[in-house]
Image: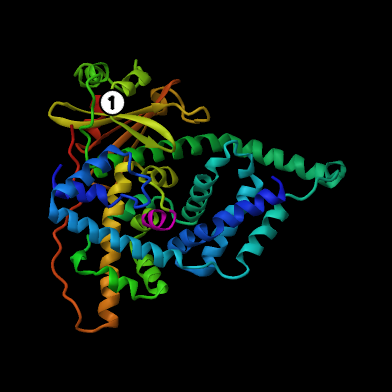
């Protein structure tokens, strides 16, 4: 791959890949390593990809695989068993409240969301990937993506609510949230 | 579609208009237009999404990361030299070839196991998480008859017309960029979910019943079996225990 092409690719994708990595790894140093490693793999292997328009999906998939590679096998599947359902009513969180928060606070809330939900949520918010694209990147079914987006958003808002209550004591209420998981219908 | 289903769908809706042509989103958006309460929920939801996305996009990578990436890229594409003519590299290459040869005996089995494990994980997740398994079209006769025949053992090569079934509306999901057909059926009062995809060219799974792999998923008591033939890779998932699954295979 020509230097100019590689530079163009890096400039186009490294900020969003870094944000994705940061949400997964929860550490700036690890996020930098993951982003660098992803482009390194591209430079050694990915440039052989025949369809250039698939570069974006390839890069995000590779970064996610590299992240998973460092973790114990089997953890990914069991992780959802340990995920608690969100407990607060999300509608009590006003958009203006989030708008008044620092970006770092919102990022910290996202990083506190369970990993199974965090990855699709980040791809949805940062890269505006469709649920189909997210399914391809994370290699999970579409139904799983939609379920995780739904539950992830609820969890994120619960975390943001907690941030608000921490920063503004006595402001707002927390009520019981009826669990709705999008239960499967089998035909 | 009730409001809870509409909300479930709309939480994945992108505000940049890219989803405007998607039938599921269109139906949910129409419902939000008709129902003021749902409409208000959607408005608030989208406002929250906008502000969260704006905040997250404001995170900037640390200074120096770009240069480090570019430097790493350059390191990986050094110009070629006649290194192979040096005896020490010839010796190293021979050693590596030996190691690869030895590792090559074990690697295909590991790769096949991992491949089956990933497909099983996908099928289990789809079984548990997919909102609707009822999206079957009218042309399901061939596959439905095949899997629901109580005398038919499924654990081998199956005469499936993949493209015709897909064209006729068999529920199709995606796994690793490939289409996967799914059908649900019952035998002896137990529910099963059968998944089939075209065998990837680079698949390392062993074709035939000897290559079949069973797994307990750790979610909702689900158990799975994955096997392959020359044309397809199959997964069967159920929640009735391993013996119930074996009885069908």
Residue B221 sits above or below residue A105 on the image: above
Can residue A87 be seen here?
A: no
Quarter of the rendering occupied by the C terminus of chain B: top left
Bounds of the magenta segment: A121-127
Q: Chain of mark 1?
A: B
Label 1: element kind: loop
Nearest the viewer among B235 and A145 is A145
Q: Is residue B38 magenta?
A: no
Query: x, y (%) of residue B236?
Result: 29, 31
Q: Is residue A125 magenta?
A: yes
Q: Please name the residue shown 67% across and 58% down the image.
A: B70
x and y percent of residue B133 in the render? 22, 35
Residue B213 location, quadrant: top left
Q: Is residue B230 left or right of residue A185?
A: right
Report the residue marked by disc 1.
Answer: B170
- Kindly identify the residue that appears in the image at 48 percent across and 56 percent down: A67
Residue B178: give x, y in percent of width and height. 42, 33
């Amino acid at each position: 791959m020509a230097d100019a092409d590689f530079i163009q690719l890096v400039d186009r994708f490294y900020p969003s890949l870094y944000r994705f990595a940061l949400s997964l790894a929860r550490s700036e140093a690890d996020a930098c390593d993951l982003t660098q490693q992803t482009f390194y793999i591209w430079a050694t292997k990915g440039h052989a990809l025949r369809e250039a328009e698939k570069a974006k999906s390839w890069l995000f998939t590779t970064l996610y695989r590299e992240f998973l590679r460092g973790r114990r096998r089997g953890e990914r599947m069991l992780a959802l068993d340990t995920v608690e359902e969100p407990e607060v009513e999300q509608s009590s969180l006003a958009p203006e409240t989030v708008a008044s928060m620092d970006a770092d606070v919102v990022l910290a809330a996202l990083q506190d969301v369970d990993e199974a939900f965090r990855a699709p949520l980040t791809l949805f918010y940062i890269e505006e990937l469709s649920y189909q694209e997210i399914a391809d990147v994370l290699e999970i079914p579409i139904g799983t993506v939609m379920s995780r987006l739904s539950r992830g958003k609820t969890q994120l808002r619960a975390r943001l609510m907690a941030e608000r209550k921490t920063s503004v004591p006595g402001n707002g209420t927390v009520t019981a949230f009826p669990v709705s998981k999008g239960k499967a219908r089998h035909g | 579609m009730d409001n809870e289903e509409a909300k479930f769908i709309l939480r994945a809706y992108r505000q940049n208009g890219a989803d405007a042509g998607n039938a599921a989103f269109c139906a949910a958006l129409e419902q939000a237009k008709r129902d003021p309460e749902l409409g208000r929920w959607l408005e608030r939801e989208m406002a929250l999404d906008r502000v969260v996305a704006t905040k997250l996009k404001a995170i900037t990578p640390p200074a120096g990361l770009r240069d480090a990436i570019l430097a790493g890229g350059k390191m990986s594409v050094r110009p070629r030299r006649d290194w192979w003519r040096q005896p020490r590299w010839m010796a190293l290459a021979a050693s590596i070839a030996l190691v690869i040869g030895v590792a090559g005996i074990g690697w295909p089995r590991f790769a096949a196991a991992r491949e089956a494990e990933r497909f099983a994980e996908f099928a289990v997740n789809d079984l548990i998480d997919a909102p609707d398994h009822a999206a079957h079209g009218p042309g399901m006769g061939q596959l439905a008859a095949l899997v629901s025949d109580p005398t038919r053992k499924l654990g081998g090569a199956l005469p499936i017309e993949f493209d015709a079934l897909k064209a006729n509306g068999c529920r199709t999901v995606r796994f690793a960029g490939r289409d996967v057909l799914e059908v649900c059926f019952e035998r002896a009062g137990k529910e099963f979910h059968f998944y089939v995809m075209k065998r990837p060219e680079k698949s390392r799974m062993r074709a035939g019943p000897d290559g079949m792999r069973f797994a307990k998923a750790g979610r909702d008591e689900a158990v799975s079996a994955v096997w392959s033939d020359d044309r397809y890779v199959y997964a069967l998932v159920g929640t009735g225990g391993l013996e119930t699954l074996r009885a069908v295979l």
